[in-house]
Structures are given as C-alpha cells and as structure tokens.
Image: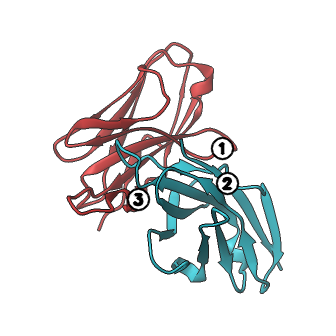
Chain colours: A cyan, B red
Amino acid sequence: AQSVAQPEDQVNVAEGNPLTVKCTYSVSGNPYLFWYVQYPNRGLQFLLKYITGDNLVKGSYGFEAEFNKSQTSFHLKKPSALVSDSALYFCAVRGSHTGGGNKLTFGTGTQLKVEL
Amino acid sequence: ETGVTQSPTHLIKTRGQQVTLRCSSQSGHNTVSWYQQALGQGPQFIFQYYREEENGRGNFPPRFSGLQFPNYSSELNVNALELDDSALYLCASSKTGLAPLSGANVLTFGAGSRLTVL
C-alpha cells in the first residue's frame, strides 16, 4: 500500500519570506512523487515531479521540492512567497511497482496562506 | 491544445438516484482517470480507463462504473446514490505509451463536477 502524509493542515507565511510545505510518503519500490496545487473552484494543477536523478526538482512558478530518500520526504519549497501562492497544495505518490493504472495516492492537502 | 473539460459543473441529486458525469480528455491523451474529492480531503482514485477498458480500480463499490469512448472521452456513472457520495468528482487525462516510467506520467485534471446528494 502507498500513503502520503501532509502533517500541516495550514501554513501561514509573510509575503517575501521562504515557504515550506511538508510531505512524507510510504510506497513499494521507487517513488514517483508529485506536487499539485488547487485554487478555489478549480481542478488540480501540476507543479513538479520527482522520478529519478537530482534530489532537488524545480517546477512551475518558482517552486522546488527536495527528495530525501532516507527520510522518505518530498517537501515543497519556494524562496520568496507571493500572496498569489495562497492555495491548497497536495502531495501525491505512485510506486514504481504499482500495477494497474496511474493510481496516485494524495495527501489530505495543506492550505497555504501568504499574507502581506 | 485544449485541456480537460467536465460536465456538468454542479448538480444535485437525491438518495437512490443515478448520475452520469462526463469528461473530455486533453488533446493527444489516451488515458482517463477518475477521482473523488470529499470536502476537506485529498482526491481518492476511483478507476482508470485505457483502450476503452478499466485498467485499475480503487476501493469503490461496483455501483461506481465508467466508460471510455473511441475518442478517449469518458463517463462516470454512479447508481443508487448515497449521502456520502457528495463530493467533487475530478477527471484526469494522461498519455500512456510503451516507454518505461509510464507511471510517472503527469495527470491533467479538469475543474471537476460537484455532486450534492440530498
């Protein structure tokens, strides 16, 4: 079985400050890890993914994520937050040994609030 | 390129009724997945369709069923609606090929269909 934990329901950060949204995972085989963002009344938008290679992955809108195999973590980061980054962020995982489709297992989401 | 479109955007049903939700895939995509997102939760995988056949299913009962058409569009059908079926239903498309790491394919999501069961 595969699972994702996002330990913080909400993260508050001031505009211009760095932000981190935490994610840990459990999966069989090598992990494929994803971050998606959801704005109100919208579907999920892809931010970035880790498949293999460099542990630091760069994605859309200045976001990046660091894969840490020993800690089974994939935290989302941004050096300088914007008010427009305020949204609901989901971490998701799929194991390389998982058969039968593109089943992604999502965390429960972290609400990011960036304030002026 | 067009994205994933879903219809209807909102609908209200009563317990015991049946509902059909529709999804048009992004151009060039051949695989469709459906997810249920309950309020305050992350999306839960319902099933996936590839080559017009179900190819993977989550922990959902048989009253959740689907179809994929030759143009890669898809339907999600739910029979005997229950109150707990109230949720946002998300359709996602992707391109499945013969290359390795196909499980790493990025899913493109639609905006969803919000179902309320009274």
Residue placed under numbered mark 2 in the picture = A109
Identify the amino acid type marked 1. Gln
Q: Quadrant of the C terminus of chain B?
A: top right
Report crowding for label 3: few under 14, some 14 to 19, many 20 or more residues within 10 A (C-alpha).
many
Q: Is residue B24 above or below residue A13?
A: above
Question: Disc 3 or disc 2, which is closer to the eye?
Answer: 2
**Left or right of residue A7: residue B28:** left
- Image point (50%, 30%), residue name: B59
What's the CA distance linking mark 2 and mark 1?
Answer: 7 Å
Instruction: Check chain identity for marks 1 and 3: say if they share one.
Output: yes
Camera-side residue of B7 and A74: A74
Residue placed under numbered mark 1 in the picture = B41
Q: Is residue B71 above or below residue B27?
A: above
Q: Quadrant of the N terminus of chain B?
A: bottom left
- The answer to which quarter of the image holds residue A20 is bottom right
Camera-side residue of B53 and B21: B53
